Amino acid sequence: MKTFKELINDCLETVDEVLPWDVEEVIEHNEKQNPLLLDIREPYEFDVLHIKGSKNIPRGILEPACDYGYDNTEPELVTARDKEVIVICHSGNRSVLAAYTMQMMGYQSVKSLKTGVKGWNDYKLPLQNIHGQAVDIDDADVLLATHIRPEKIPRTLSI
């Protein structure tokens, strides 16, 4: 049995990660060949804040979204197997698992955004909401703060 972190570490043997400032540079300098920014967070997370130009396909429907013949098929994603894809999540963990899965499905240039949307905001890069309005960096900090409900904390840990 593996822990979540061990599973991610195993996937990192084949999944490349890219840092927020590197993604920003690629976006700024490659207007014709920008990577597909794939945000795999849940729709409610994406609606509140996301990187401009990113496409939201939740992790839970990723595999059928990557293939034709399913209710969740996303043609832009299906046809991106030869395109650079950067997978985005909250902190850079789920995106590693998603990128690994996409590699298994034939995606040639898929990477995970190390540190996720949280790191993007920490680097003071712009985020927007579903209406295209800029999200203030400090507001984003609050929205991205990890909230652990008391009932989820094991009794053996103290915070």
Image (cartoon, rainbow, N blue to C red):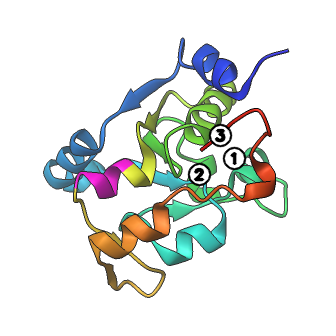
State left or right for residue 37 relative to residue 31.
Answer: right
Quarter of the picture containing the C terminus is top right
Picture layout, residue 103 above or below residue 130: above
Q: Disc 2 or 1, which lies upstream in sequence?
A: 1
Q: Position of residue 140 (x, y in %)?
A: 38, 69
The crowd level at tag 3 (other Cα within 10 Å; few <14, some 14-19, many 20+) is few
Q: What is the C-alpha distance between the residues marked 1 and 3?
A: 42 Å
Q: Circle 2 is placed at which residue position?
A: 77
Q: Nearer the viewer, mark 2 or mark 3?
A: 3
Q: What residue range appears in magenta?
A: 119-123
Q: Secondary structure at mark 3?
A: loop
Q: Secondary structure at mark 1?
A: loop
Residue toward you, 37 or 107: 37
The crowd level at tag 2 (other Cα within 10 Å; few <14, some 14-19, many 20+) is many
At label 1, which amino acid type do we have? Cys
Find out whether the residues at labels 1 and 3 contact each other: C-beta distance under 8 Å. Answer: no
Q: Circle 3 is placed at which residue position?
A: 158
Q: What is the C-alpha distance between the residues marked 2 and 1?
A: 6 Å
Is 138 included in the stretch rendered in magenta? no
State left or right for residue 50 relative to residue 124.
Answer: right
Quarter of the picture containing the N terminus is top right
What residue is shown at x 16% (from left), y 54% (from top)? Answer: 28
Q: Secondary structure at mark 2?
A: helix
What residue is shown at x 63% (from left), y 14% (from top)? Answer: 10
Q: Circle 1 is placed at which residue position?
A: 66
Q: Nearer the viewer, mark 1 or mark 3?
A: 3
* Residue 139 seen in this snapshot: yes
Find out whether the residues at labels 2 and 1 contact each other: C-beta distance under 8 Å. Answer: yes
Q: What is the C-alpha distance between the residues marked 2 and 3?
A: 43 Å
